[in-house]
């Protein structure tokens, strides 16, 4: 039976992907920073039909020792780790870059960038020993060079995630190591991530023009997760991008926005 480790999987996209993998009979390792959140997620996953086992582990991905411990605990219980997904991420406050203090910068880069690097490196070392495996890093706004005001730090981190993933793909090929590494591009997900920062601790209001775009391009994470997981399981190619919101799909959404009206923010 195959095993998947998903960081940041007690809520949002990570949790929805965990549900899909559970439904595909994977052993699923759930990871988060809050004991109550982990317990709740595992409890809900127990209600999803699947033949695999569940394991919840507390882990701060910005701490390399904790990521090593996550890997060791998962492999001690299940043996091989077939898929590792670096999904953990936090948003920035809806402010210009110079208005953010250094503590928020350290926190965001620690989770979004360093956390992805830690997870990638730990997974590569483990999968090199077992002789196979696949790693996927979640992209975000900025990965495609798009620039949006008041998301400078978040976009910078995600652009770096894309570069790092591409670089590791090239290094794995050069070293002749048979590990798949790829990128997951989920587009705009309608969760509280869009309206909060610092790990969903601080809420803020979006501008109306931003809401308008999100209403056109956004989707709920369960829809996106189903698409991504199906393709992750089927994928055999390294340095791939599994993309939900393609340019063609986005263009169609804008073209039909007048007919297909949606309001995710209607209280």
Image (cartoon, helix red, strand yellow):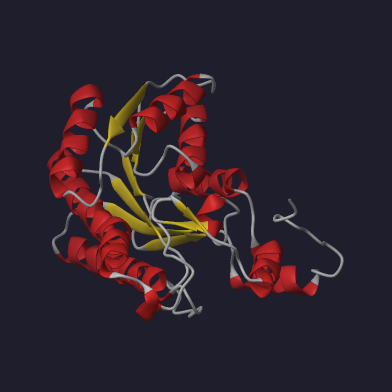
Q: Residue 193 location in percent, x, y? A: 50, 54
Q: Quadrant of residue 138?
A: bottom left
- Tell me what residue is drawn at x 29 percent, y 59 percent: 107
Look at the picture and state if 22 lies above or below 190: above
Look at the picture and state if 142 lies above or below 37: below
266 horizontally vs 32: left or right: right
125 horizontally vs 57: left or right: left
Q: Quadrant of the N terminus?
A: top left
Q: Residue 267 location in percent, x, y? A: 73, 50
Residue nearest the viewer, comparing 223 with 150: 150
- Tell me what residue is drawn at x 27 percent, y 44 percent: 133
On the question of residue 10 being in view, the answer is: yes
Look at the picture and state if 158 lies above or below 199: below
- Tell me what residue is drawn at x 36 percent, y 80 percent: 98
12 horizontally vs 263: left or right: left
Q: Quadrant of residue 169?
A: bottom left
- Tell me what residue is drawn at x 28 percent, y 34 percent: 58
Residue nearest the viewer, comparing 125 with 196: 196
Q: Residue 86 location in percent, x, y? A: 33, 50
Residue nearest the viewer, comparing 214 with 105: 105
Q: Quadrant of residue 218?
A: bottom right
On the question of residue 178 being in view, the answer is: no
């Amino acid at each position: 039976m195959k095993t998947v480790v998903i960081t940041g999987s007690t809520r949002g996209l990570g949790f929805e992907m965990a549900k899909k993998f559970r439904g595909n009979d994977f052993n699923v390792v759930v990871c988060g920073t809050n004991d109550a959140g982990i317990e709740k997620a595992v409890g809900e996953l127990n209600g999803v039909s699947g033949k695999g086992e569940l394991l919840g582990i507390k882990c701060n991905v910005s701490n390399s020792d904790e990521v090593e411990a996550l890997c060791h605990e998962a492999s001690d219980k299940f043996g091989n780790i077939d898929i590792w997904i670096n999904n953990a991420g936090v948003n920035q406050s809806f402010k210009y870059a110079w208005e953010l203090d250094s503590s928020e910068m350290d926190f965001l880069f620690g989770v979004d960038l360093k956390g992805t690097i830690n997870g990638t490196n730990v997974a590569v070392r483990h999968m090199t020993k077992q002789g196979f495996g696949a790693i996927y890093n979640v992209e975000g706004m900025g990965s495609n060079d798009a620039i949006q005001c008041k998301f400078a730090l978040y976009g910078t981190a995600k652009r770096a995630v894309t570069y790092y993933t591409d670089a590791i793909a090239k290094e794995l090929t050069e070293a002749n190591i048979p590990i798949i590494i790829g990128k997951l591009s989920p587009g705009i997900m309608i969760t509280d991530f869009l309206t909060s920062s610092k790990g969903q601790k601080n809420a803020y209001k979006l501008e109306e023009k931003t809401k308008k775009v999100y209403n056109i391009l956004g989707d709920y994470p369960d829809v996106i997760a189903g698409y991504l997981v199906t393709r992750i399981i089927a994928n055999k190619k390294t340095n791939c991008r599994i993309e939900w919101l393609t340019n063609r799909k986005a263009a169609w959404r804008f073209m039909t926005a007048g007919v297909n009206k949606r309001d995710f923010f209607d209280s």
